[in-house]
Amino acid sequence: AQSVAQPEDQVNVAEGNPLTVKCTYSVSGNPYLFWYVQYPNRGLQFLLKYITGDNLVKGSYGFEAEFNKSQTSFHLKKPSALVSDSALYFCAVWRGSTLGRLYFGRGTQLTVWP
Amino acid sequence: DTGVSQDPRHKITKRGQNVTFRCDPISEHNRLYWYRQTLGQGPEFLTYFQNEAQLEKSRLLSDRFSAERPKGSFSTLEIQRTEQGDSAMYLCASSLPGTGPLANEQFFGPGTRLTVL
């Protein structure tokens, strides 16, 4: 069963504009949700996570994400995009077992043009 | 650099050959994970160690794949009789012990890109 969906393969935005990268999940219970970023020929870098508490989570490099339980979404946002934000972004969910495997979406390629 | 390291970064091999990859996790992390990432896909879980014990294996991990973590520190992933379908990026990650939120934050290495000709 699909645990995480990233409905957009690509997102294009002009520098200085706000950006949103979408993620929806489908797991039972209370999920732990993560965003990772991948630059070319690099491993995944952790951006932010939602465990519990405030639905708005702030992370690295000015990114934030909003957890919406009713819509089962965890969209990544940034108020003002930079060209250097161009990368591949992955949403991931931890299902709450004790074993810790992450389930990743297919990724969204973000391109910020000058 | 005290992050997760992987060796080699690139490996080209011929079909039918055996290959072995190494992962060195962050030193205080007792949990270690292997993932496989193919083009256009997110990473897919392969296996997980807590210290030296292999606690979970994905169905993706066929009998040609074996992973070890003999002393609870570095880990190796071996693929025997490689096939062209094994071509992928193999990612290693590690995380802290425990059950709290920090234990779920996985730190990834740069990956080993395998090409099977």
Image (tube, helix red, strand yellow):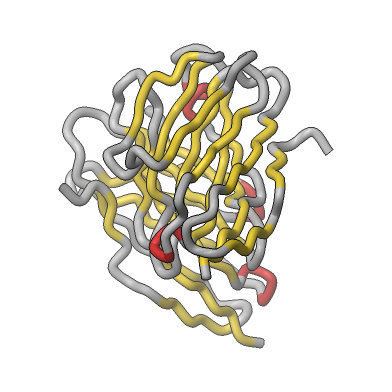
Q: Residue at position x 61%, y 86% from top?
A: A113
Q: Name the quadrant of the C terminus of chain A.
A: bottom right
In front here: B113 or A76?
Answer: B113
- Dividing the picture into quadrants, the one containing residue B71 is top right
Report if residue B105 is visible in the image.
yes
Q: Residue at position x 36%, y 33% from top?
A: A32
- Looking at the image, residue B10 sits to the left or right of residue A96; the answer is right
Picture coordinates of residue B98 (x, y %)?
A: 50, 12
In this picture, is A88 found above or below A92?
below
In this picture, is B102 found above or below A12?
above
- Looking at the image, residue A48 sits to the left or right of residue B2; the answer is left
Picture coordinates of residue B101 (x, y %)?
A: 48, 23
Picture coordinates of residue B65 (x, y %)?
A: 43, 40
- Dividing the picture into quadrants, the one containing residue A100 is top left
Report if residue A54 is visible in the image.
no
Q: Residue at position x 37%, y 74% from top?
A: A9
In this picture, is A61 found above or below A93?
below
- Looking at the image, residue A10 sits to the left or right of residue B113; the answer is left
In the picture as drawn, the residue positioned furthest to the bottom comes out as A114
Picture coordinates of residue B35 (x, y %)?
A: 46, 44
Q: Residue at position x 66%, y 20% from top?
A: B73
